[in-house]
Image: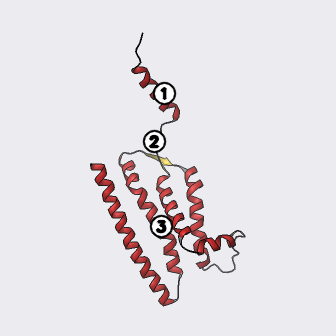
Amino acid sequence: MKRFLYYFIWSIAIAFIVYLGLQLQELVNERGQMNFNPVPYWIYVALFPVVIGLLLRTPKFMLERKERRIQGFDWSKFLAIGIPAFAVIILSILPFMPLENIPYPSFYDPFNLILFNGTTAQTIAGVVFGYTLLDSFKGEERGLQETTSDLFNAVMKFTPKG
């Protein structure tokens, strides 16, 4: 029951933060339209899902940290999942950066249509990046060999000797 309440309270908190974030997004959009400056809105659209991804992984991360199970950082997971998601976020913000006379990568044009057709790509990439960032902290993992030997020992313990 204690675990249920922990996750339930986190769910309510995340829902409240998402609600406030969407209200803030609407405010940023209105201000951007008044000032004819869409840059803050697009940056917010790209970065707010990262916060959501972080929040989704935070409850388990805090439990792992409390139990002192975090031992290091899983660079392979972060490089394979986190960096491509981060690249989508950066590519979506790149046109709004004040980078004069810097050529865009040749592969950027096809992605440009996908990224700016809506906010779906930024949202998915942001949530994935935020979640992966916290999920890449390694807990103490036992290898397959240890787990297999534990299973074997448990089976042998209950096997009749004859």
Mark 2 crowd level (few <14, some 14–19, many ≥20, 10 Å Cα): few
Considering only order in the chain, which callout, 3 or 1, is on the residue closer to the N terminus? 3
Dot 1 amino acid type: Ser
Residue that protrudes farthest toward the right in the picture: 106
Q: Residue at x 45, y 28 (%)?
A: 151
Q: Nearer the viewer, residue 18 or 44?
A: 18
Q: Residue at x 52, y 64 (%)?
A: 124
Identify the image quadrant of residue 117: bottom right
**Distance (Cα) linking label 1 and label 3:** 42 Å
Q: Relative to residue 57, is residue 111 depicted above or below?
A: below
Mark 3 crowd level (few <14, some 14–19, many ≥20, 10 Å Cα): many
Q: Residue at x 59, y 79 (%)?
A: 96
Q: Nearer the viewer, residue 97 or 21?
A: 21
Residue that protrudes farthest toward the left in the picture: 1
Indicate left or right for 89 with 9 as reference: right
Q: Which residue is mark 2?
A: 140
Any mark on residue 119, and which?
none
Q: Which residue is mark 1?
A: 149
Pinpoint residue 57: horizontal percent, then vertical percent: 43, 56
Considering only order in the chain, which callout, 2 or 1, is on the residue closer to the N terminus? 2
Count of numbered labels shown in the rendering: 3
Pinpoint residue 155: horizontal percent, then vertical percent: 43, 23
**Distance (Cα) linking label 1 and label 2:** 18 Å
Q: Which residue is mark 3?
A: 49
Identify the image quadrant of residue 20: bottom left
| SS of the residue under disc 1 | helix
Pinpoint residue 88: horizontal percent, then vertical percent: 59, 66
Dot 2 amino acid type: Glu
Indicate left or right for 116 with 20 as reference: right
